[in-house]
Amino acid sequence: MDDFVKKIQERRIDGKYSLISKIGEGGHGAVYLGENFETDEQVALKLVHCRNGFSSLEEEVETYHSFEGLPGFPKLYSYSERDDYKVMVLDLLGPSLEDLFVFCDRKFSLKTTLMLIDQLLERFQALHSKKYIHRDVKPQNCLLGSGRNGNVVYLTDFGLSREIMTIKEGDDEVLPKHPRLVGTTRYASIRGHLGYVQTRSDDLESLGYMMIYFYRGSLPWQGLKARGDSEKDRLVMEMKKSLDEAAICSGLPQEFETYMRHIKSLSCGKKPNYNKLRRMFRELAVREGVQYDNVFDWTERVFSLKEMNTILG
């Protein structure tokens, strides 16, 4: 990888993109900060070795093309192969919601949680309208924009995304199951754990777990002791199946339980009522005196730190 990075820095991608520094790394590749020398704009470059990329990167590129122009989805500028690597050039985004969660001492206020729910339900409605499901919903895959889009939450990392299959209720039980969990154990839907073909409701079930995690600060199945990943997946799945919506949402406003109950009650392949769910949480916001003004917990914290630094000189 180091030799390849040097080659890109010397020759550039498409004659105009160059690498600056690594900003992240995943299972199959790495993400670098880059620059467009024609516009002086910074970009993100995702590098995947050809032997690790399979056809997944090509599928991800097609997914990005499907979302072109939609708010809250990164723009794909370029895709090419150089030497032994496949390279995607994308919008450079800001921190992930997991980064911001840690920055805010691992707990978000009701206001921040509700503003995130509102944006993300809109994102998933757009994603699903393009006939795709994400299949790996987690805070690390939700990033803030940059500059004037700094308060916009973006959905990212579509490496596990797939087109939505038309499935009649009960048909999924006779379809071949996936041999292992697709997604992330902490936020995966129960159907995802069981290996069934995933649908829209699986994305929204994962979103529900993520929002409970943000507002409460943790999920009931965090910290389970297991001998390996397979046992951990099984234990987490069993706990998710054993807890009803009231137990999972204990201590939270009733709307969270209503949300989870609605999502889990949907028959296989049925479309969720996104607008009704957004309206329900907006009514909760009105009742609690919450304004959707894009002033998040991290916004206030950064302002307080700057103010303190000014006072301390």
Image (spheres, rainbow, N blue to C red):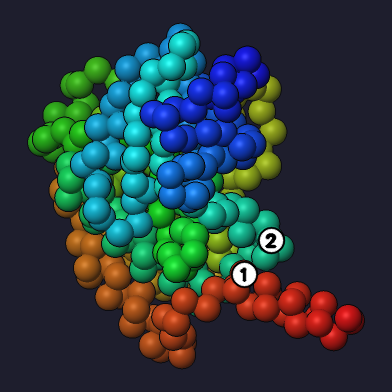
Sequence-first disc among 2 and 1: 2
Q: Residues within 10 Å of mark 2 (few under 14, many from 20)?
A: some
Q: CA distance from mark 2 to mark 1?
A: 7 Å
Percent x, y for residue 118?
36, 68
**Closer to the camera in the image, 273 or 27:** 27
Q: Which residue is mark 1?
A: 298
Helix, strand or loop at mark 2 = helix
Regarding residue 107, the answer to whether it shows in the image is yes
Which residue is pictured at 62% across the width and 59% down the height?
101
**CB atoms of marks 2 and 1 within 8 Å:** yes
Q: Mark 2: which amino acid?
A: Phe
Q: Residue 24, relative to residue 265: is it above or below?
A: above
Q: Residue 291, located in which quarter of the rendered image?
A: bottom left
Helix, strand or loop at mark 1 = helix
**Closer to the camera in the image, 103 or 179:** 103
Q: Which residue is mark 2?
A: 103
